[in-house]
């Protein structure tokens, strides 16, 4: 759960990005598939958005997930998964780097990201199964996998937590930094 400062920071940043694009609350909420009242609460610094909600908003705003969460210093998480932005590239294609922690006995289903987006995961410690649903790869420490993230994918741990470095590379038709 995000602290109040992080919720306020995300809300202000989200509102600024929406207004830069000339979108109403209703337009963004409808496009992202969330209730207008929920989006309003998020912009006011209330509520506790899921990772999928933040991803959907980033996709609709055509902005990298990392750009949307960059002002937040604490890890974001739900369902046993925490992510923290490490850095964002300044070139093209846009590349974001994250630290990710998956708690023991975690199964996290992630929604598809923007077309052409790819994820690369390097396992630092633990055990992790990850990749597109139906085509996952098992990682042990030091292993790296890259897969298309523009389709539903998952992360699964067993008895130990998994520590991962994740990079997200947005597709050519993807997002604007």
Image (spheres, rainbow, N blue to C red):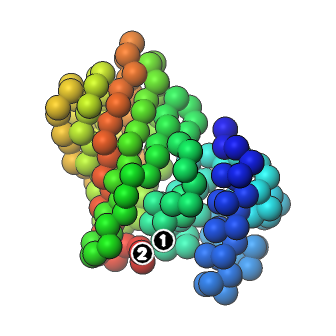
Residue 42, visible in the rendered structure: no
Residue 127: x %, y % from top left: 29, 23
Q: Is mark 1 on a helix, strand or loop?
A: loop
Q: Between residue 115 and residue 170, name the one nearer to us.
A: 170
Q: Between residue 22 and residue 83, name the one nearer to us.
A: 83
Q: Is mark 2 on a helix, strand or loop?
A: loop
Q: Mark 2 and mark 1 in contact (Cβ < 8 Å)?
A: yes
| Occupied quadrant, residue 123 | top left
Residue 19, compared with residue 49, is above or below; it is below
Residue 136, compared with residue 34, is above or below; it is above
Give the quarter of the figure containing the C terminus: bottom left
Residue 5, compared with residue 117, is above or below; it is above
Give the quarter of the figure containing the N terminus: top right
The residue singled out by tag 2 in the image is: 177
Q: Residue at x 32, y 73 (%)?
A: 90
Q: Which label is found at residue 63?
A: 1
Q: Which residue is drawn at 53% across and 42% down?
A: 75
Residue 115, visible in the rendered structure: yes
Q: Residue at x 40, y 22 (%)?
A: 161
Residue 55: x %, y % from top left: 53, 57
Badge 2: residue crowd in 10 Å (few <14, some 14–19, many ≥20): some
Residue 128: x %, y % from top left: 31, 27
Residue 137: x %, y % from top left: 23, 33
Q: Between residue 6 and residue 34, name the one nearer to us.
A: 6
Q: Which residue is drawn at 17% across and 32% down?
A: 142
Marks 1 and 2, how far apart at CA: 6 Å
């Amino acid at each position: 759960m995000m602290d109040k400062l992080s919720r306020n920071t995300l809300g202000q940043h989200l509102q600024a990005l929406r207004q830069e694009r000339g979108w109403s609350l209703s337009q963004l909420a409808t496009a992202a598939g969330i209730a207008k009242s929920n989006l309003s609460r998020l912009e006011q610094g209330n509520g506790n958005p899921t990772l999928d909600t933040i991803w959907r908003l980033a996709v609709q705003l055509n902005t990298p997930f990392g750009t949307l969460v960059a002002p937040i210093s604490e890890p974001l998480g739900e369902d046993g998964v925490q992510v923290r932005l490490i850095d964002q590239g300044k070139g093209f294609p846009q590349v974001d780097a994250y630290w990710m922690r998956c708690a023991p006995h975690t199964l996290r289903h992630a929604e598809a990201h923007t077309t052409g987006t790819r994820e690369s995961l390097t396992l630092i410690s633990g055990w992790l199964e990850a990749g597109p649903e139906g085509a996952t790869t098992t990682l042990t420490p030091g292993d790296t996998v890259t897969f298309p993230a523009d389709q539903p994918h998952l992360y699964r741990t067993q008895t130990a937590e998994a520590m991962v470095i994740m990079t997200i590379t947005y597709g050519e038709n993807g997002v604007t930094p």
